[in-house]
Amino acid sequence: MASAAQRRIKSISYAKYGYIFILPFFLVYFLFQLWPLINTFIVSFHGNGNDIDSFVGLENYKALLFGGDKRQDVIHDKFVHSLGNTIILWVGNFVPQIALSLSCAVFFTEANLKIPGKEFFKIVMYLPNIITAASVAVLFLQLCGQSESTPGAINLLLSKIGIVDYDATSKKYDVIPFVEGTVQARVVVMFIQTWLWFGNTMIMLMSGIQGINPSLFEAASIDGATAGQVFLKITLPLLSPIMSYTLVTSMIGGLQMFDIPFLFHKTTTVNDELKTIAVLIYEYFHAQESNNKMGYAGAASVLLFFITLVLGCIAFYMSRDKDAIAKKKQRKKMAKQLKMESKQFGGFSI
């Protein structure tokens, strides 16, 4: 028999301290973030070109998704175009980002490679992640842009090696429009996003690879598997949970992309081709027209939330572990069968 003191010691729970530690986050969230989120839903049912106090029901959503009169058709076209720009910019930076991050993660976690200064390279690759996006955007605008008479640093460098021509008559450079061209500006924004975030993605994938049982790699090595076979048969399948997480978090961040497209959008002449959903919401929220557009901003925010939710659910559904689901269904089926058999004998099993 355990003594009363021993029973008291066993009954002590330290779970409350965990709740105390996370309490500040929830207090700040409820005070400063929960009400703005709720208010966004409320605002989305008001306005529609009228005063923000005017309740219009689902008219804002109808205008954004389907249009209507001439004014609502313009609202619809802007929303669809901005959504297309957002998806193009996100896919264009996510695909090279995940390819580069996965390659670096596999390279740095390879046990047979003795790379001097490995930790230094990891830190250098992660450093862009801690730089503010606005600072990076200004930096690349200076590098890629040009004034009326002087090209940017990149065009000037290309002129030195003969790729960009200089017209002595007009005293102007035949520059590559990295910022002013539609395709070029999009490529620059995609490159910036990839450069900023691939280090963070690399660290997450490295943690996933290091969590794989080393005995699996040793067994594959003994069986004579090549590096490609190990990657395709062991590393990639076992990385599916962290890959799913990376996909969803990147998608959430990509659909909310604002800083860099906004600064490029305000600085260049290819405004509409870099306008993302977040930039459109910002413009609606700060619209100076007599007809209030805050209702459109709220409705666009809510639609962006549901688009992200649907795409996230699809991503999780496609990356689910089918073997684990099949085993779970089998266990449920067996438990149900045993329960039915026990009922046939009055609750007693034989």
Image (tube, rainbow, N blue to C red):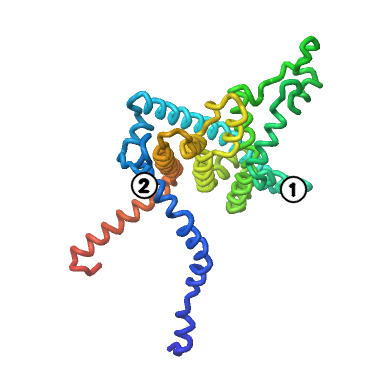
Query: On the rendered image, what quadrant is the C terminus found in?
Result: bottom left
Eye-nearest disc, 1 or 2: 2
CA–CA distance between discs 1 and 2?
52 Å
State the residue at coordinates (68%, 32%). Answer: 141
Image x and y of residue 343, in percent: 20, 64
Image x and y of residue 326, in percent: 38, 48
Q: Residue beneath label 1, please?
A: 118
Image x and y of residue 107, in percent: 68, 42
**To which quarter of the image does residue 80 belong?**
top left
Amino acid on which disc 1 is placed: Lys
Is residue 318 visible to the viewer in this orientation of the structure? no
Between discs 1 and 2, the one toward the N terminus: 2
Say whether residue 255 is left or right of residue 65. right
Say whether residue 300 is left or right of residue 136. left
State the residue at coordinates (55%, 32%). Answer: 89
Asked which secondary structure carries label 1, the reply is helix
Q: Residue beneath label 2, please?
A: 42
Q: Is residue 13 above or below residue 35?
A: below
Specify few, some or many for label 1: CA neighbours under 10 Å numbering under 14, 14-19, or 20 or more. Answer: few
Is residue 21 visible to the viewer in this orientation of the structure? yes
- Camera-nearest residue between 258 and 160: 258
Amino acid on which disc 2 is placed: Ile
Asked which secondary structure carries label 2, the reply is helix
Q: How many marks?
A: 2
